[in-house]
Image: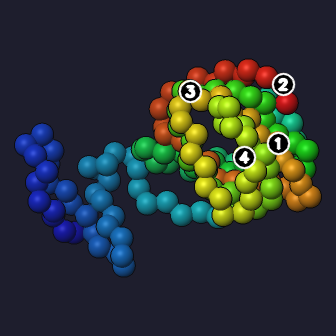
Amino acid sequence: MVTLANVGAEHPPLKCQIRGKFLLFDPDYLGVYTMLHKNADEVCFKKVDAGSNTELQVLIGPEEAPNFCMRRFVMKPGGGMPEHTNTVEHQQYVLGGNAKIGIGSEVIEVSRDDVIFIPAGVAHWYESLGPENFEFICMVPNSPDKIEILGNC
């Protein structure tokens, strides 16, 4: 166990272990959050009710990490999500496939290795162009999110 410098009178000194390149913090300091490793194949897919031919996996949920949720979306060709807004930002990385995404008044086409940032409150929608599934990782803050559906899928 290593003790790091005190970060202020309101916080106790940080205690952690050095394991390879990683610092593993004392769970008493961080609460219930600890290092996590799992295979995405172990996580169940759930149908996205507002979308068409769209499923998602919550790869890292709010009970597993304090600040961000990591989700994987899979849209079959022709599937998508209707125009909607969220009260949280989205940071996305395209794993594969092709899609049209509307963000505000812009429409873009995206494919493997593209990254997308959608600011909180900005209307957006998705349409999978095929021929293969459109798949992407979506990171969102672990804070309350109000979703408002504005259009049809």
| Residue identifier under label 4 | 108
Which residue occupies the foreground of this view, 66 or 32? Answer: 66
Q: Which mark is first along the chain, 3 or 1?
A: 3
Left or right placement of residue 97 versus residue 3 in this view: right
Q: Is residue 49 visible?
A: no
Q: Residues at badges 4 and 2 in contact (C-beta under 8 Å)?
A: no
> What secondary structure is marked by label 4?
strand
**Place of residue 146 in the rendered image (x, y in percent of width and height, measured from the top left):** 58, 23
| Residue identifier under label 2 | 152
Q: Which mark is first along the chain, 4 or 1?
A: 4
Residue at point 80%, 55% (across, down): 98
Residue at point 32%, 67% (across, down): 23
Q: Residues at badges 1 and 4 in contact (C-beta under 8 Å)?
A: no
| Residue identifier under label 3 | 121
Amino acid type, callout 4: Ile
Amino acid type, callout 3: Gly
- The residues bearing labels 3 and 2 have C-alpha atoms spaced at a distance of 18 Å
- The residues bearing labels 1 and 3 have C-alpha atoms spaced at a distance of 20 Å
Q: Quadrant of the N terminus?
A: bottom left
Indicate whether 27 appears above or below 88.
below
> What secondary structure is marked by label 2?
loop
Indicate whether 4 appears above or below 20.
above
| Residue identifier under label 1 | 127
Q: Which mark is first along the chain, 2 or 3?
A: 3
